[in-house]
Image (tube, grey):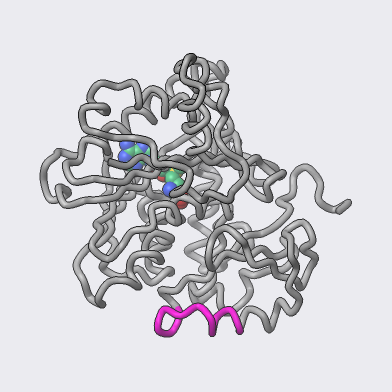
Amino acid sequence: KEEISNDVTPVRWIRINPLRCPGNDVNSVLAELEKKFTQRVDHWKDIVPGCIYHDDFIPNVFGIHPQDKITSHELYRQGKVIIQDRASCFPAHILNPDKNDVIIDACAAPGNKTTHVAAHLLPKCEKGQLTKIYAFEKEPRRAQVLQKMTNIAGCGKAVKINVGDFTKLAIPDQYKDVTGLILDPSCSGSGIFGRKYVDSLNRAKRLQDQEKKHQQNDKEENDLILEEEEQAVASDDPDLQSRLSKLSSFQFQVVKHAMSLPNAKKIVYSTCSVHPEENEKVVIDLLLDRKVQEWGWKVAGRENVIPDWPRRGIKGEFDQVFRKETAKCQELADSCIRALPREDGGIGFFAVCFER
Ligand code: SAM
């Protein structure tokens, strides 16, 4: 416990990637994994080196001790095991696409959620099917990382990467068949902590270092974590409020654009921010938008959004707007998911699902 200082992740989350498992069956890989992690614990707080925790909320997700260097394990090198924070696994699990769905991941690099959606969807589809997931990334360098991640994860041709701005996407076009979207736009990254903390001024340098490491094909323990850190947006704006207001209006725009897709029926919006401005308030602005109402979008109820996860949205944020409708505010808050940094075993996170 002493060693879990303020800057260290209390647990390292990993998931087994069915796309790299024989017959998409994770059991043989789990058995391999359990040769290294011989003792199973009932709570992530009890993890010590050599132990494994089977997560109660997300299938195929496990916690191990940060000192156990999973990156030197063969399963990791083969893409059978992927490092991904548990909370970052919420969106694909909530979207839960079925074989007829076509998905857009609108803000995709480095690809944690793209590859996780693929892990949900592709085993349900026939082999060799055409594109099932379109992954957008506006920054070319980050799109290269995304390409690498999808290759390692074994997504094949089912994932098509588009280097470009999702909000500039003309509709309708070939995306008119899209039914579901993952919306994980740039955010303040305020839920990311400790050694994962993003100093935006160092962002460019870190990307370079990271690329060098990739070129050397010498993956250090922190590589993928650093990629996740890059979720935070670079900004030299010293005023937090004005920064949050710029971010939230971008986040609103990008979700609203997704909602204009004619056949979309499910959208999962998420951030790794702890600020209501980027979370509940974006939900409120969308619900109050006339077009969004016209298009028939609603917030999906708690029963479809990891109902047993205890930490939900902040009701007070909804109270401020829908004052007289207490039940509605409770329902909306319950429909959102929050994770607190460290306290909930990983990064701070927010997720909500819209459907129609
Ligand atoms: N979903 C990713 C994952 O789980 O690995 C993390 C995404 S990160 C929070 C946001 C990404 O969206 C960044 O790579 C950023 O460059 C990209 N982005 C921001 N605005 C975009 C836009 N308008 N169109 C496409 N990509 C965008």
Q: Is 69 placed above or below 44 here?
A: below
Relative side of 323 to 119, left or right: right
Q: Is 54 placed above or below 95 here?
A: below
The verdict on residue 341 being magenta is no
Point 54% across, 68% down: residue: 60
Relative side of 327 to 175, left or right: right
Q: Quadrant of residue 120?
A: bottom left
**Viewer-nearest residue: 130 or 144:** 130
Would residue 34 be visible to someone looking at this image?
yes
The overriding secondary structure of the stretch rendered in magenta is: helix
Point 70% across, 45% down: residue: 342
Residue 51 horizontal/vertical position (percent):
75, 71
Q: Is 217 placed above or below 146 here?
A: below
Point 44% across, 77% down: residue: 20
Would residue 110 be visible to someone looking at this image?
no
**Viewer-nearest residue: 174 or 333:** 333
Residue 44 horizontal/vertical position (percent):
72, 59
Q: Quadrant of residue 241?
A: top right
Relative side of 188 to 137, left or right: right
Residue 314 horizontal/vertical position (percent):
57, 29
Residue 35 horizontal/vertical position (percent):
68, 84
The verdict on residue 27 being magenta is yes
Quadrant that contains the C terminus: top left
Relative side of 103 to 274, left or right: left
Q: Is 74 placed above or below 165 here?
A: below
**Which residues are drawn in magenta?**
21-31
Point 74% across, 65% down: residue: 42
Q: In terms of image quarters, where does ligand 1 lie?
A: top left
